[in-house]
Amino acid sequence: MRRYHGWNDRNVRDAKFIDPLTLGRFYRKAVVVAGPGIGKSTVLKRLAATYAFDDVPVARASLKSVATRMLDRGETFAEAFFQIALGDSPVPSAERLLPGRWVLLCDGLDECGSMQSAIAEGLLAYATAHPGARLVVVTRPVGYQPAALVEWRHYELTPFDDTSVTPNLASLLDEILRPSSRSLADSYAFVAEKIKGSKAGKRAARSPMLLSLSASLLARKATLTGRRGDLYRQIVDLIESEPSPRQTSSIAPGYAHGCWTFWAISSPSIL
């Protein structure tokens, strides 16, 4: 547990920072390693939107779901991946109908459990059979077995630095309050005063998820003490206070024709 939560506290020397939206552009096989809540899935969503904008066929899927399908149905990695990524499309071999070399965005290699080796073998087999394809895999550090993909280019997502916490919190606070016409005259000064003299800023800097939750708490006039227990209690109270988003659907069963939606959410730096 200490290793899992302390991943972002490591000192990384001689780091070379790159734009995360260039992943797969120059090195076609990449593994992105990042701690909890850093924005791994968000990076994949942004990459999917970026490649799609460039008219490159792109597919994104959870590797945990792929592993389950391989185990339950005996499908190959490619069969399971595309069935999930394309939403069980009724069109046979749908992935072959789009011209060009595919980009495969693979989420959560560390969540595959005992099937991780089989998934890694499937990734290697697909890369070998499709040398022009691009494959980007994201994973948490704990639970990831790097031996199989040791020759792939590895990257890490890094947390925010302490100096960027206040402006980022202020920006998020403005976005939260603007629709309700409750914007602050000086959100930066407000945030600086709220986190002054505590470890709240350092705690929020650990991940975009904690930064966003901290902004939500500030918007509700909560006090950020900087103590981990207080923050987690406030987060649980915040979640429990929100109404359930689930609604009963009146749509009749049958094939659903959907589309992907992507959110342009700012993400941390990548090294």
Image (cartoon, rainbow, N blue to C red):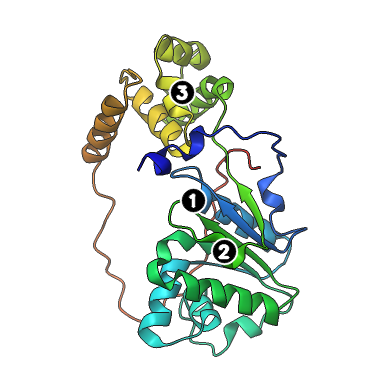
Q: Which SS class for mark 2?
A: helix
Mark number displayed over residue 141: 1
Mark 3 nearby-residue class (10 Å; few <14, some 14–19, many ≥20) = some
**Residue type, label 1:** Pro
Mark number displayed over residue 84: none
First in sequence: mark 3 vs mark 2: 2
Mark 2 nearby-residue class (10 Å; few <14, some 14–19, many ≥20) = few
Q: Which SS class for mark 1?
A: loop
Residue underneath mark 3: 202
Please report contact status of discs 1 and 2: CB closer than 8 Å, yes or no.
no
Q: Residue furthest front?
A: 147
Residue 177 visible in the picture: no
Q: Which SS class for mark 3?
A: helix
Is residue 164 toward the left or the right of residue 226 in the image? right
- Residue 107 in the image, given as x and y percentages of width and height: 50, 61
Question: Which marked residue is nearer to the observer: mark 3 or mark 2?
Answer: 2
Q: Is residue 113 above or below residue 175?
A: below
- Residue 235 in the image, given as x and y percentages of width and height: 29, 34
**Residue type, label 3:** Lys
Question: Which marked residue is nearer to the observer: mark 1 or mark 2?
Answer: 2
Mark 1 nearby-residue class (10 Å; few <14, some 14–19, many ≥20) = some
Q: Quadrant of residue 92?
A: bottom right
Is residue 119 toward the left or the right of residue 3 in the image? right
Mark number displayed over residue 147: 2
Q: Quadrant of residue 50?
A: bottom right
**Residue type, label 2:** Ala
